Image (spheres, grey):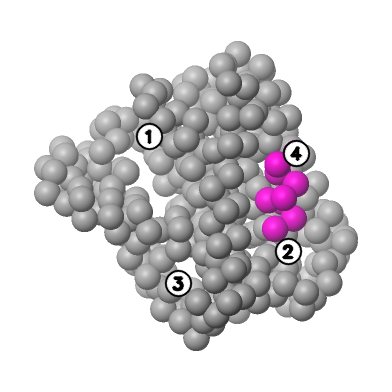
Amino acid sequence: MNLSFEALLAVAPIYAAIATGFAARKFGWMEAAADKSFMKVAIDITLPCFILANMLSNKKLESVEFSAAAILTGMAGMLACMAVSYIASAAIGLKVGTGKRTFIVTTATHNYGFFVISMLAVMYAGSSDPILGVAFTHNVGCDLVFWTIGFFLISSGQNFSAKTFLRGPIVAVFAALVLVWCGLGDFVLKYAQNTLRVIGGCAIPLNLFMFGNLLCDFWGREKFNPKIIATAMITRLAVLPMMFVAAAALLPIDPTLKKLLVFQAVAPCGITSAVLAKHFGGYPQMSVQISVATSVAAVLTLPIWLNVGFRLIGAQ
């Protein structure tokens, strides 16, 4: 099957889940009054279980050296994206208090979790390719930056404290690393696997549904700002993919990690930024608009960057 077509089929369920969340809000099945509770369940319960279920079974993580390299690659990528997004926000004159921080975090945060993981899970289902395990390892670095610097920025620092580091996802990441490095990962997973996978399996659908809810809430309420949306799309779908693909081609890193960087390049903006923007004092309308615009346009840019990237690194 053609690589690009296979990738497009792999992300189809993501768009379907968002549409389901939109419909659920539209017909009153998921009411706004329950949003805060849904967010706590999604972020602090289901997501940690999802992380633990996948990290504890990841043999690649047993190598501290490889784990550190993959995590640092994820962190470096996110920090570079934030730097580029900061420059883009300054170029269009955004200021703090008018959506600058929300723009930076939303545009910088590619959908490394739901979009990329879902795509890899479908494309490499039943394969011996270790890329899915590497992706979870790499995403640890992305999560560390997003849940610290990203959360601090999008909440304007008002809700940031030492407790931020005790949020479910970060605790789950470090707990999993310690357990795997101590050789206890398989032991824990043996007795908790079914529970972790059942609860963790709700993480992606819940977050996608919540994004669909937000999309319904803000649909038609505010006009798209052409300058902001265009800048975000150029940054997220042209400038940053070029950066990721160049890094994959030029950096002396593991071939699997090179391939993963190409997949990171094709992802649109993540949806979690919009959820956090709503509940922590950001600009959710802007975040939703950027996420929707890049997600729709990604259908066109995904095949281009995937083929260019794979050719440059000599992968199949």
Within-10-Å neighbours for mark 2: few <14, some 14–19, many 20+ = many
Mark 2 against mark 1, which lies toward the viewer? 2
Looking at the magenta stretch, what is its main secondary structure?
A: helix
Q: Position of residue 66 (x, y in %)?
A: 36, 30
Task: Give the magenta range.
Answer: 292-300
Q: Residues within 10 Å of mark 4 (few under 14, many from 20)?
A: few
Q: Is residue 282 magenta?
A: no
Q: Nearer the viewer, residue 77 or 48?
A: 48
Q: CA distance from mark 4 to mark 3?
A: 31 Å
The CA span between labels 2 and 4 is 18 Å
Taking 260 as reference, is 68 left or right? left
Residue identifier under label 2: 289
Residue occupying image coordinates x 65% and y 48%: 268
State the residue position of label 3: 39
Looking at the rendered structure, the kind of residue marked 3 is: Met
Decide: is 254 above or below 237: above
Task: Give the amino acid at mark 2.
Answer: Gln
Q: Secondary structure at mark 4?
A: helix
Where disc 2 sits, the SS reads helix
Q: Is residue 86 visible?
A: no
- Where does label 4 land, which residue? 300
- Label 3 crowd (10 A; few <14 / some 14-19 / many >=20): some
Q: Position of residue 138 (x, y in %)?
A: 45, 39
Circle nearer the viewer, 4 or 1: 4
| In the displayed structure image, the side of residue 216 where residue 188 appears, left or right | left
